[in-house]
Amino acid sequence: MNAMEKRELVIERSPGYIRAAVLEEGRLCELHDEREEGGARTETLFYGRVQAVRPSLNAAFVEIGLELNAFLPLREGEVLRGGQWLIVQGAAQQSTQTKGLRVSRKIQLAGRFLVMVPGESGVHVSQKVRDPRRRQELYRMAQSVCPEGYALIVRTATEGVTAQTLEAEARELDERWKAAVRKSLGMIRPGVLMARETLDMRLVRDLAGQGLERIVTNSPDCIQAVHAAMQEGKIAPETRAEFFDEEKRAQRLFDALNLETQIERALRRRIWLPCGGYLVIDFCEAMTVIDVNSGKMTQGTDVEETALRVNLEAVYESARQIRLRDVGGIVIIDLIDMQEEASRDAVIAAMKEAAAQDRVPVSVEGLTRLGLLELTRRRGDAQLGRNLRTTCSCCHGLGEVLSSEEVARRAMRQAHRMVLSGQRGPFVIRCGATAAQELEKMALPMEAEVYALAAPGYHREKFDIEQMGEEKSPPQGAKRLTPVTLRMRDDEENAGP
């Protein structure tokens, strides 16, 4: 992260629900939410039972006490059998809501400075620690405190850390793992073995030491926990902790910081850039696609300079939107075409710089021959849009519905099928108001008594056809449709000699 940027953590608690925002220079860059029950499951430890092994997928499905069985990729040479019990950890939400949690047998217990991996060995230092001398120092300290039977990963936020601090955290993580193993011995059915920390405390843990200047919350319990963490040395003393009393200020915390407006913008498909260009963000099953458009941008001495300026703003904003929406998997950015190699190199460098601010690993793969910028981001919890929105009941996620004319034609074809099958009318087609209007404009392709009736509350694509008895009168408001032969006769009479 740029050294000049200020990072703030805003935590809002309400009954059964936690919402947290990470700000950089006052701009919303991350948004997280969690329900006390049934929230995200990454980092959670489960005691599970293998339900099925699928060699063709090199994976197993594991019952872990949730509605859907978890998906467990198998490591090379790993052999499991049905009914086998094992400890797994939530690794990532799958790309769709119909797939179970992705889990791993590689357990990672995270502390502020260390990540402990039971059953493995060795010491590793985060790649984000760039200074070779500091890397070597951290490696030696971690090696001296690493318990037998574990591997240790030294995290990025280790400025000023001592060997004693690392040793104390290693002992704490060791005890957490042993407690989980003891608990599993008494479990008789699959379920949660060790829940992860609450959202607010996880963020405090992960952001401490990463330029976190202020923590503000509306929760008395949360502010007490933050002060306790400060006294234990888990949060840098220069970090300010503030309690926001919503009752006294007569304002909600997120409203006071103008976060609700920024959240609403984060759900939009089109995002405007300062230069006048804009992004269009679309999600699909396999990947996320971001289309870059020049829009109202007219500055620049030539086409190449204009394209470069828009693309540079686009990659920085794309990186922020990816973080904010918690996009995982493959991301394709369709840039404005650039002819010069120097321009393409500058855009790739800007994307890597912007991605370096992300706490989730991002790999920038480069530009394709067609000018598409490819990158991947590790999947975490559910994307922002899936957390805050649900599939449209009208279009079922397509973003489009049938035109009223097409609905009318489908209803007409169905009525024709009924006549051809020998059914006798009269028939009443009930449908939405706009489709009924289209039916009234059409000529019947058969000799039959057919009525169109606008039905309040009908989905715009829905229609029903009722076969009435000959003794029944058509419903009030129904309009009879004209057979094509009668309409042709009327047209001839109106034409005159």
Image (cartoon, rainbow, N blue to C red):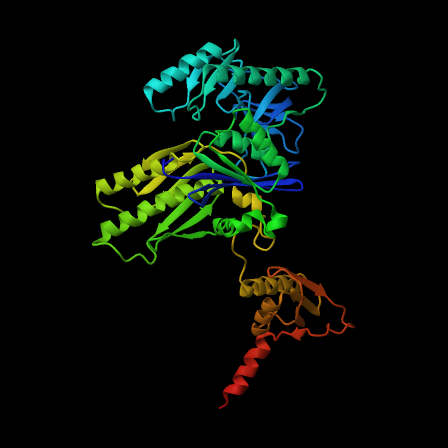
Residue drawn at x 34%, y 42% as measured from the top left: 372
Decide if residue 410 is on the left or right side of residue 290: right
Res. 311 in view: yes
Position of residue 386 measured from the top left corner of the image (x, y, whole percent): 55, 44
- Write down the quadrant of residue 32 in the picture: top right
Total marks placed? 0
Residue drawn at x 51%, y 34% as measured from the top left: 380
Decide if residue 53 is on the left or right side of residue 358: right
Q: Residue furthest right?
A: 471
Position of residue 387 measured from the top left corner of the image (x, y, whole percent): 57, 43
Position of residue 338 measured from the top left corner of the image (x, y, whole percent): 25, 46
Where 221 falls versus 256 (above or below)?
above
Where 377 falls versus 469 (above or below)?
above
Position of residue 230 measured from the top left corner of the image (x, y, whole percent): 54, 28
Res. 389 in view: no
Residue drawn at x 20%, y 54% as measured from the top left: 301
Image quadrant occupied by the N terminus: top left
Where 119 falls versus 419 (above or below)?
above
Q: Residue furthest top?
A: 148
> Foreground: 105 or 157?
157
- Write down the quadrant of residue 98 in the picture: top right
Residue drawn at x 21%, y 43% as measured from the top left: 340
> Foreground: 465 or 136?
136
> Foreground: 333 or 497?
333
